[in-house]
Image (tube, helix red, strand yellow):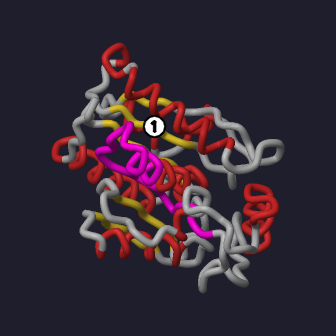
Amino acid sequence: MPGVLWIHGGGYQSGSAGSIFVTRARSLTVKYGAVLVAPDYRLSKKHPYPAALHDCYTALKYLKEHADELGVRPDQIMIGGESAGGGMTAALCMLAHDRGEVNIAYQMPLYPMLDDRDTPSSADNHAPNWNTRRNHKAWKRYLRDAYGTDMVPDYAAPARREDLSGMPPCYTFVGDIEPFYRETVDYVRRLKEAGVEASCDVYPNWFHAYDLFFPARKVVREAIERFESHYRYAAEHYFAPQDR
């Protein structure tokens, strides 16, 4: 079966691996049999960038190196996550591509936290759950002295990467009133411009992590079905054989 590294959210500063079982990751295992690996990465309250990235990359290499024992197809290693987990998904795809140690078949960075700089949707945002104030605080904690400078690496804030060629195919969704709306749609647009298969569904009046707050609502159930449909397509069509 596909092996999915699913990375929890929490602004890089909170959350735990166990929380993935109340997220979109659960159905990938329960309904479709995917093998999930969830890294309990170090949080930025005590360990700023790049600690979490190193932890998640170690887990990614573990997934590759233990694919046979885990029952995972080595040519179908995928990465996904919500919010900060989505941002880490994009960062890991970039790091894996650049190092050439793990080939990623598919990425699912849901409403990802990608850009430490203000965007038209993250500036002066007062939506429920996540807003400008919380976003600034989380990025400052994650980046420490690099925050607000041009010294931020794209592995920390993936929106800063200029060349997205060679990235794996991508699916995501996002609400149009949340801070990460613009950086999410821009990421998908730039992937497509780089020749990468990518798509994004945008849901009106959804604040950050809306699907986790209201999973029983009809529009959320429809969004979940679309997410699962994209995963099923990926499991049937996207492969990335390992070089070694």
Point 80% across, 59% down: residue: 144
Rendered position, 194 above or below 76:
below
Q: Position of residue 219 (x, y in %)?
A: 42, 64
The residue depicted at 44 percent of the width and 74 percent of the height is 185
Quarter of image, res 135: bottom right
As rendered, which of 215 and 85 lies closer to the eye?
A: 85
Specify the quadrant of the image occupied by residue 31: top left
| Residue 148 included in the magenta stretch of the image | no
Residue 138 percent location from the top left of the image: 75, 60
Compared to residue 210, the image places residue 72 above or below, namely above
Taking 11 as reference, is 132 above or below it?
Answer: below
Q: Residue at x 54, y 70 (%)?
A: 160
The x, y position of residue 22, in whole percent, is 56, 40
Horizontal placement of 68 versus 213: left or right?
A: left
Q: Is residue 167 above or below residue 47?
A: below
Would you identify the image quadrant in which residue 205 lies? bottom right
In the image: residue 194, left or right of residue 221: left
Magenta stretch: includes residue 105: yes
